[in-house]
Every structure is written in C-alpha cells, then in structure tokens.
Amino acid sequence: MTQAPHRTPGANYQTFKKGIEHPDPAICANVIVGLIKVTPYLLDRQPRRLERDFLNEGGLRERMTRARLAHRAKQNYQPPNP
C-alpha cells in the first residue's frame, strides 16, 4: 500500500508534481485543494514545535553561545604529547 503524498516526510513539489501537472483539471484541482487543507494544520503545529524546541534547546542567543563555546574549545584543544 502506498503512502498518501501529503503524509510523505520531506514532501516537496516533486512529490505532488504528477497530480498538479495532470492533464485532467479535476485531478489537478483535487491535489491543490488537498494541499490547501493540509496547510492550516501545518501552520497550527509550527508554534507548538517552536515552543518545544525553545524549551529543550534554549533561545537563539543560548544556542549561539553554546556553538561559539564549542568552537572555541575545539580550536583550543591541544592533544597530549606522547
């Protein structure tokens, strides 16, 4: 059984190209209507995901500071002399 294109992880235009460019306008319209219906669901989920990421990983400044400190530590690391 094949998975519905709108449930395909990482779906892009190529995923829907066959339906969007179909010669039958009814099929093309149905694919586009389906994408329109999925859009509000995804937009509704985005703020919740951003909140979860903020709580788990911190804000932008925190992540930038961690990245900079990790980069400095990597630059300053000197392997022990044998």
Image (spheres, rainbow, N blue to C red):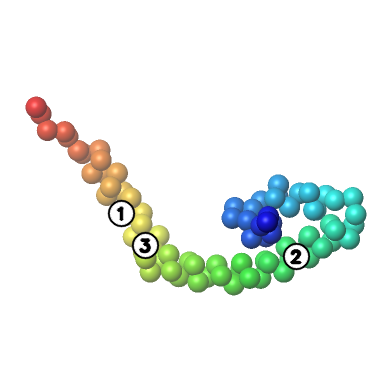
Q: Amino acid at mark 1?
A: Arg
Q: Nearer the viewer, residue 4 or 81?
A: 4
Which x, y percent locates residue 80? 12, 33
- Where does residue 78 sit, x and y in percent of width and height? 17, 34
- Left or right relative to 10: residue 52: left
Residue at the spot 38% in from the left edge and 69% down from the top edge: 55
Residue 76's disc is none
Side (left or right) of 55 relative to 3: left
Q: Which residue is mark 3?
A: 57
Task: State left or right for residue 68 relative to residue 15.
Answer: left
Location of the N terminus by quadrant is bottom right
Q: CA distance from mark 3 to mark 1?
A: 10 Å
Q: Is residue 13 above or below residue 35?
A: above
Residue most extreme to the top: 82
Q: Is 51 in front, or is 38? A: 38
Q: Which numbered disc, 3 or 2, marks the residue that appears first in the sequence?
A: 2
- Which residue is tagged 1? 66
Q: Earlier in the sequence, mark 3 or mark 1?
A: 3
**Contact, mark 3 vs mark 2 (Cβ under 8 Å):** no
> Residue 62 sits in which quadrant?
bottom left
Q: Nearer the viewer, mark 2 or mark 1?
A: 2
How much space separates mark 3 and mark 2, taking CA atoms? Answer: 34 Å
**Residue 34: assigned label:** 2
Query: Element under label 2?
Result: helix
Quarter of the C terminus within the rendering: top left
Q: Amino acid under label 2?
A: Gly
